Image (tube, rainbow, N blue to C red):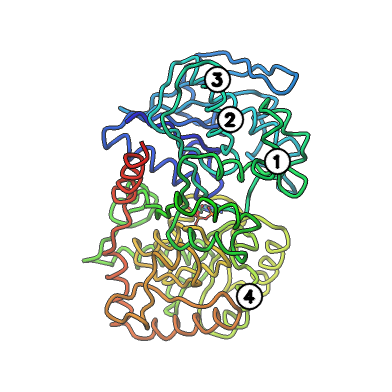
């Protein structure tokens, strides 16, 4: 099949979260399975500075109609490997900035124009470069205009660009809501501004358009597919998602086992596998040392890596601070995000330097070291479409402590509920539930046999993209 992916992030060129990993791995695995895959991504400054992108050819100049303006742009084409080509859509005015979405304090004010331009440019490149797809698969609100833009371009030009369109919701909390006037930039007819179109409480909602107009809608776990049809998790779009219930599927992401495999991980001071965990001990000591803590510490080490936002349950972590202060344990957090959480965690770590460490930066190497060196991995999320770290941590023999939400339910098995199959500890997304889960973790750590069995079961699970990509392949085949 000829498959085109369109997304605002793509590992290894630009990443702020799991979207980049998911699109990167899915595209790469589909190419390995023999499909012809193209991925479109904005040519952000960070992406163009990536060492591999330097060899990308600047092939095409573009002119994109944006309301009554015409915006010039360009596209760089990077042949990554057999079957996989990445197209970077460039325009300095929109993408030559320090980060993809905002300045750290708030989102850029022209994100509507930036991503409308991106979507329209993708259609334009497909038209000029004669890319004819079996499936155009777009991801999240930044690419949500594609299903509709493609159909309008086909109608206008009489050229068939895509047999079918698929739209994936990676996180329904981000929808791309903008003033009505932004819609003029799409050059789509105003009749699409009604309640059956992009209109959303007097504004436009780009994700709503993706959900309504794609041939198939997917999200990143079966549980999240159910949750987003409820007011608690649907973030206002539950009714819209419900109208597509028959065309909605939840497919769990995989993990890139070339990047996340403790037996081959070159970012670690030692490697290990399920039959010999000696290397995990070496990583644990290295992690403690790096955080300025005593390497010989014997109690449980808790790790956490995430965007420091409300979604990730930082309030629950902070509410559990007495546990970390009173118990003989260590807590190591890597993340950046909301200043409120950064400050609260910073103050906590400053007051308890020997026990609690915080790294405020994006650091792939430390993230690997935490996954390998910690005994437990914390994910007290309030909602979690799929989540990747709970899968990484199981692969690394680090027992996940997670809330019972979304993809966490689909990928972790509680050790008390299923003693013979358990791989982690699950709890309600509440302060009391989380503290109780931390105590269960502490007790498990004090029972080496049970802990080791849990680790071995976790490491034995198959979270590979092979499995996940096959599910997408089947979905594409059924859709065409
Ligand atoms: P989300 O997409 O909601 O942020 P996921 O768990 O799906 O959450 O994916 C987050 C990804 O980003 C994981 O690969 C995680 O390790 C990584 N990550 C998050 N924060 C950091 C950080 N500060 N440094 C390194 N990696 C990070």
Please determine whether, in this image, residue 239 is positioned above or below residue 443: above
- Secondary structure beneath label 1: loop
Residue in the picture at 51% in, 72% down: 403
Quadrant of the rendering where the C terminus is positioned: top left
Q: Nearer the viewer, mark 2 or mark 4?
A: 2
| Eye-nearest disc, 4 or 3 | 3
Q: Nearer the viewer, residue 163 or 351?
A: 163
At label 2, counting other C-alpha atoms closer than 10 Å, the crowd grade (few under 14, some 14-19, many 20 or more) is many
Q: Residue at x 43, y 68 (%)?
A: 409
* Residue 396 point in image, percent of width and height: 35, 62
From mark 2 to mark 1, how far is it between C-alphas? 21 Å
User: Label 3 crowding class (10 Å Cα cut-off): few <14, some 14-19, many 20+?
Assistant: some
What mark, if any, has residue 194 been given in the picture? 1
- Give the spatial CA distance, label 1 vs label 3: 26 Å
Q: Is residue 123 above or below residue 316?
A: above
Disc 4/disc 3 C-alpha distance (Å): 56 Å
Give the labeled residue for mark 3. Answer: 124
Apparent side of residue 138 relative to residue 415 in the rendered image (left or right): right
The x, y position of residue 406, in whole percent, is 49, 64
Circle 2 residue: 119
Q: Which mark is residue 30?
A: none
- Which residue lies under the disc numbered 4? 352
Between marks 2 and 4, how big is the CA–CA gap? 48 Å
């Amino acid at each position: 099949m000829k498959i085109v992916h369109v997304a605002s992030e793509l590992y290894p060129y630009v990443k702020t979260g799991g979207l980049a990993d998911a699109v990167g791995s899915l595209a790469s695995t589909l190419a390995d399975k023999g499909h012809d895959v193209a991925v479109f991504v904005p040519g952000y400054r960070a992406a163009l500075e990536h060492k591999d992108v330097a060899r990308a050819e600047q092939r095409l100049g573009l002119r994109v109609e944006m309301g009554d303006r015409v915006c010039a742009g360009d596209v760089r084409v990077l042949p990554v490997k057999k079957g996989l080509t990445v197209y970077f859509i460039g325009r300095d005015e929109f993408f030559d900035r320090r980060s993809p979405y905002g300045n750290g304090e708030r989102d850029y004010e022209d994100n509507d124009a930036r991503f409308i331009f991106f979507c329209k440019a993708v259609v334009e490149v497909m038209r000029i470069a004669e890319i004819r797809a079996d499936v155009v698969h777009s991801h999240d609100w930044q690419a949500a205009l594609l299903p509709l833009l493609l159909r309008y371009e086909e109608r206008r030009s009489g050229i068939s660009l895509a047999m079918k369109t698929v739209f994936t919701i990676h996180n329904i909390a981000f929808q791309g809501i903008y003033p009505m006037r932004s819609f003029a930039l799409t050059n789509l007819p105003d009749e699409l501004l009604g309640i059956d179109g992009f209109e959303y409480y007097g504004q436009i909602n780009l994700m709503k358009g993706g959900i309504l107009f794609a041939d198939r809608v997917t999200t990143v776990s079966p549980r999240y597919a159910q949750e987003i049809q409820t007011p608690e998790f649907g973030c206002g779009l539950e009714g819209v998602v419900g109208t597509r219930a028959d065309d909605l599927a939840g497919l769990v992401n995989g993990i890139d086992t070339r990047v996340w495999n403790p037996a081959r991980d070159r970012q670690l001071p030692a490697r290990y596998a399920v039959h010999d965990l000696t290397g995990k001990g070496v990583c644990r000591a290295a992690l403690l040392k790096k955080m300025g803590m005593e390497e010989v510490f014997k109690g449980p080490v808790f790790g956490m890596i995430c965007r420091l936002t409300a979604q990730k349950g930082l309030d629950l972590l902070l509410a559990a601070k007495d546990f970390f202060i009173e118990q003989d344990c260590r807590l190591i957090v890597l993340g950046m995000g909301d200043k409120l959480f950064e400050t609260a965690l910073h103050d906590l770590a400053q007051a308890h330097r020997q026990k609690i460490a915080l790294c405020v930066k994006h650091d792939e190497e430390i993230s690997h070291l935490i996954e390998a060196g910690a005994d437990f991995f914390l994910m007290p999320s309030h909602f979690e479409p799929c989540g990747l770290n709970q899968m990484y941590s199981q692969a690394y023999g680090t027992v996940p402590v997670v809330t019972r939400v979304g993809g966490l339910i689909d990928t972790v098995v509680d050790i008390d509920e299923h003693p013979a199959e358990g791989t982690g500890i699950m709890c309600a997304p509440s302060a009391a539930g989380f503290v109780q889960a931390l105590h269960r973790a502490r007790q498990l750590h004090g029972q080496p046999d049970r802990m080791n069995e849990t680790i071995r079961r976790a490491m034995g699970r198959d979270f590979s993209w092979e499995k996940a990509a096959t599910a997408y392949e089947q979905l594409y085949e059924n859709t065409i």
